[in-house]
Image (cartoon, coloured by chain):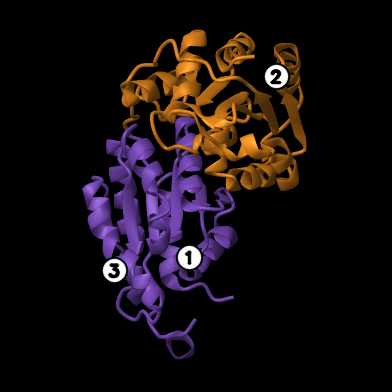
Amino acid sequence: MTRLDATRALAQRLGPAAAIASLGHPAYDLYAAGDRPENFYTWGSMGVASSIGLGLAMAQPERQVVVLDGDGSLLMNLGSLATVAVVAPPNLTIVVWDNGEYGTTGGQPTATARGADLARAAAAMGIQHTATATALDALGAAIDAALAEPGPWLILAKVKESAPVAKPPLDCVFIKHRFMVALGSPESAMSGTSVRA
Amino acid sequence: MHIPPWAREVADGLVESGIREVVYVPDNPLSHLLRALETEHHALRVTIATREEEAFGIAAGLYLGGRRTAVLLQSSGLGNSLNALSSLLVAYQIPTLLVISMRGEEGEWNRAQVPMARTVRPVLAALGIQTFTVESAEAAEATVRRASALAYGTRTATACLLPRRLTTPEPVNGGVE
């Protein structure tokens, strides 16, 4: 399965879940698969998507939070797996698009192309629910399980690199405001300030 | 165990500002502040991160979901934070209160702490992150509260610096900790 096919399979299952996309191709594909206010596209901060997802899952425990990460990005922030395991938010799912390469920067090989296994890394750090999917039906089943059963989950999806077909909005502050309003965040730009009588 | 007054006052300032989440990477002086938070402010959730950049990612997610967060770090850890600070917090206008325990300034005995400490103020200034130094226990609560007001009112990351003259006024063990 290509990453775009896999992202489409994920997007159609998101429902009201918030989605945090790592920069570059994971964010581009999420936008192409279905733009919605509940999508938060990062344009930088490589490696940090799973940490953003962790914080959001802590802040809104009633909402499902899905992170769309890449193998190269997660390798940059492996400590995040340990923190996710310790905090253990039941509403967090980290999906790792593992194509074995730094796809956004020209296809340089990542360590997963040489055998590094990020699902086993997650399990070793204490994340109890992990799954590895190499085909669309298995990926869909894993996502359905993750959204239905308490996590945290890490789903490793073995994907083929695919050329991006679209890019999300460039305005970071717009992305933030739209996302926070959709989530009903009390800190959103739609919130006024109370005045003491 | 004794909690120094500056630590109690900084903790009070955080709570008074509506901050309910603390994400941190540990440091010796910060241990006093963490103890003050854990013993006196149970409404506040404290989360330890493995690295400072991760801490800022968690803080960003908490803010997006509506929770005000302080990130506690040592000056050396600012160097581990810069991409998340610049391309996430600054670019997306995500406010966070940084509480930075300064090593490498007057009273320092460890040469390795000095170079990064010298970059803290100019690097934060270059990112548009204002810094306010907590000069005394008496000024601590107000300094933190006013820095938080700036951060959350104007949606900008803002830093409070805790100098060694505040946190470690007398050299410990002849200056070696």
Residue B117: horizontal and vertical position, in percent? 32, 66
- Distance (Cα) linking label 1 and label 2: 40 Å
On the image, which quarter does residue A84 sit in? top right
Question: In the figure, the purple chain has which letter?
Answer: B
Quick check: do tags 3 and 2 share a chain?
A: no
Question: In the figure, the orange chain has which letter?
Answer: A
Residue closest to the eye, A117 or B47: A117
Q: Which residue is mark 3?
A: B135
Residue closest to the eye, B17 or B61: B61
Image point (43%, 86%), residue name:
B175
Residue A186 appears in the picture as rendered? no
Quick check: do tags 1 and 2 share a chain?
A: no
Q: Residues within 10 Å of mark 2 (few under 14, many from 20)?
A: many
Marks 1,3: beta carbons within 8 A: no
Q: Amino acid at mark 2?
A: Ile
- Distance (Cα) linking label 1 and label 3: 16 Å
